[in-house]
């Protein structure tokens, strides 16, 4: 007999696949020619400003929203152009989204603009407004693209872990326990960023906010907004989340396979899960399919990172490095070649060295799913220990050693580059790109770990230890730089400030002009 959480999950999934009566509502249509040009622009932009694929649409919504807010604070003037721009850019299908969604987005934006206006006298106003923009982008994406199946899978995983995890060393309330598991499951299963974590946790804690809140609620909510944000940030960064995350990562492959089986089977999913003899071979087949898909995605993702970084590197090289080196009579073809091609080559090596588990891991994942779907009478609990507490002196000494080793690593690379005639500017740019590559490679490698069911710390040996000593300083620097580049990427800033807004006006003009030509043609006919 299948478990109650599995049964509830399958019942939810069944309801999603039931055909609904389609009301005769007009769908949003954008011009074919304008959408082709806009789609090409978005593709080129993604190469320059490459982001994680699952966050691409949400980040694009936030980008458009910020630009539109500079021109207007009227939700009616923002909602329609925003939705049209998203469809035109290829982020949503043409002639699929009902026109009623525009009014829904308008109402959604109204509550966020209402909150922003109430923050005029708050000291942390700017940070709260940026936070609200991230929440708004997350909610807009959810309104335009249904996340029901994703939410059902997330809730299924949270329920399974909630009954298994115990905290023998700490006293924790049931509500907080569920919220911390909720955060950890999003991080590993859905790879949610800070904005998505904040939005989903906010929706969980304040459901009224997501369901047409009243003016009275918004007034009260705005007065407590700094405390609300602080509480959500604290839960996301709670010390126990990392401990829960380690356990959740071992369960993630099983839920990925369950989702794949449900997506492939649709209305037949319940029948597959109700028969152990049919589920086990389906799990093995689905694992193989996901394994091959993940290998293809990693190659594609790595290739796009290489192209993105190589283009950015060439842009900086010919705009700044070459003129600077020639001005100071320090131009070196060898240094330029190393500076251009070593960072992309490093990414290539990282992609080539990433190992995706196969046979042994497949058995662990399949056994785990079978135990979860068809539970034993006695449920096995998993203890979650609280983080080890170190004294202030030990923390100080360890931090000092890490800083010293980081200085040694950077200094050694710096010295080596000086020996092959790198200028100071070229060295700084090389170290920056090397750090970005090291950090990006770590994120790509982390995506492959979604299929690993073993405790990841057990796999680490002396080679990993030595690699961490060398690469961690670069990865830390890369993490900081990637955040700064999101704000201060020169090419992206130029696109946003001087190119994108006029381009969108041009697209809108093409639509209007083609509509006018069609009407004149119809008059002649």
Image (cartoon, rainbow, N blue to C red):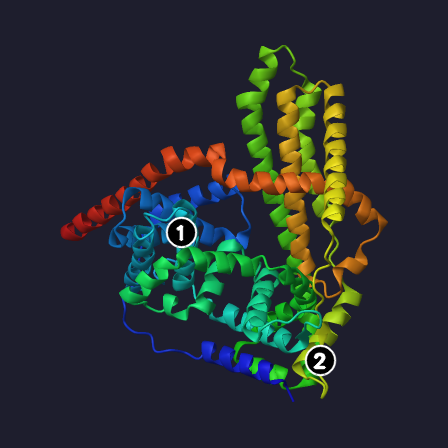
Q: Tell me which corner region of the image, top left, top right, bottom left or bottom right, holds residue 173.
A: bottom right
Label disc, if present, on residue 321 of the rendered structure: none
Where does label 1 land, which residue?
133
Between residues 266 and 46, which one lies in front from this camera angle? Answer: 46
Q: Is residue 412 above or below residue 456?
A: above
- Residue depicted at x 27% and y 68%: 25
Along the line of sight, the residue nearer the viewer: 475 or 448: 475
**Position of residue 149 in the picture relative to residue 303 (left or right):** left
Q: Earlier in the sequence, mark 1 or mark 2?
A: 1
Position in image of residue 118 (x %, y %): 31, 53
**Measured along the vertical axis of the image, is residue 127 above or below residue 426?**
below
| Pick the front one: 418 or 184 | 184
Where in the figure is residue 433, as x and y percent of width and height? 63, 34
Q: Report which quarter residue 58 is drawn in.
A: bottom left
Residue 284 located left or right of residue 312: right
Q: Residue 371 bears which disc, if any?
A: 2
Outermost residue on the right side: it is 462
Q: Residue at x 47, y 70 (%)?
A: 148
Does any portion of residue 61 appear in the rendered image?
no
| Place of residue 45 in the rendered image (x, y in percent of width and height, measured from the top left) | 47, 41
Q: Is residue 248 visible?
A: yes
**Residue 68 at what x, y percent from top left?**
32, 46
């Amino acid at each position: 007999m299948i478990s109650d959480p599995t049964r509830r999950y399958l019942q939810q999934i069944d309801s999603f696949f039931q055909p609904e009566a389609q009301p005769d509502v007009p769908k949003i249509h954008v011009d074919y020619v304008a959408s082709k040009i806009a789609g090409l622009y978005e593709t080129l932009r993604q190469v320059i400003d490459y982001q994680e694929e699952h966050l691409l649409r949400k980040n694009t919504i936030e980008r458009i929203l910020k630009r539109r807010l500079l021109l207007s604070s009227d939700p009616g003037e923002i909602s329609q152009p925003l939705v049209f721009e998203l469809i035109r850019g290829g982020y949503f299908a043409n002639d699929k989204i009902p026109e009623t969604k525009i009014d829904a987005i308008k109402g959604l934006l109204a509550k966020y603009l209402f909150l922003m206006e109430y923050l005029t006298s708050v000291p942390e106003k700017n940070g709260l407004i940026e936070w609200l923009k991230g929440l708004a982008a997350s909610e807009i994406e959810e309104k335009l693209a249904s996340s029901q199946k994703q939410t059902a899978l997330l809730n299924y995983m949270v329920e399974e872990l909630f009954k298994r995890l115990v905290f023998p060393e700490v006293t924790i309330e049931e509500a907080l326990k569920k919220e911390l598991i909720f955060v950890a499951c999003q991080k590993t299963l859905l790879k949610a960023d800070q904005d998505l974590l904040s939005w989903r946790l906010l929706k969980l804690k304040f459901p009224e906010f997501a369901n047409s809140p009243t003016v009275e609620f918004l007034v009260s909510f705005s007065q407590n907004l700094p405390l609300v944000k602080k509480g959500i940030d604290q839960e996301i960064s709670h010390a126990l989340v990392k401990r829960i995350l380690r356990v959740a990562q071992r369960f993630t492959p099983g839920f990925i396979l369950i989702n794949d089986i449900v997506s492939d089977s649709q209305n037949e999913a319940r029948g597959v899960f109700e028969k152990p003899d049919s589920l086990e071979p389906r799990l093995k087949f689905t694992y193989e399919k996901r394994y091959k898909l993940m290998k293809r995605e990693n190659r594609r993702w790595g290739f796009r990172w290489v192209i993105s970084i190589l283009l950015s590197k060439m842009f900086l090289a010919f705009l700044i490095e070459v003129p600077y080196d020639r001005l100071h009579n320090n131009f070196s073809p060898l240094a330029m070649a190393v500076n251009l091609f070593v960072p992309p080559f490093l990414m290539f090596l990282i992609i080539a060295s990433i190992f995706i588990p196969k046979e042994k891991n497949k058995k662990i994942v399949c056994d785990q799913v079978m135990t979860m779907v068809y539970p034993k009478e006695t449920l096995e609990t998993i203890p979650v220990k609280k983080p080890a507490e170190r004294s202030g002196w030990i923390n100080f000494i360890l931090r000092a050693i890490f800083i010293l080793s980081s200085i040694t690593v950077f200094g050694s690379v710096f010295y080596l580059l000086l020996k092959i005639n790198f200028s100071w500017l070229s060295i700084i740019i090389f170290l920056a790109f090397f750090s970005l590559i090291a950090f990006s490679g770590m994120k790509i490698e982390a995506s492959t770990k979604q299929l690993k069911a073993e405790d990841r710390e057990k796999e680490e040996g002396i080679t990993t230890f030595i690699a961490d000593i060398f690469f961690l300083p670069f990865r830390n620097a890369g993490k900081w730089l990637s955040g700064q580049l999101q704000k201060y990427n020169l090419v992206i800033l130029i696109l946003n400030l001087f190119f994108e807004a006029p381009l969108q006006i041009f697209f809108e003009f093409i639509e209007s002009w083609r509509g006018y030509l069609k009407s004149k043609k119809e008059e002649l006919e």
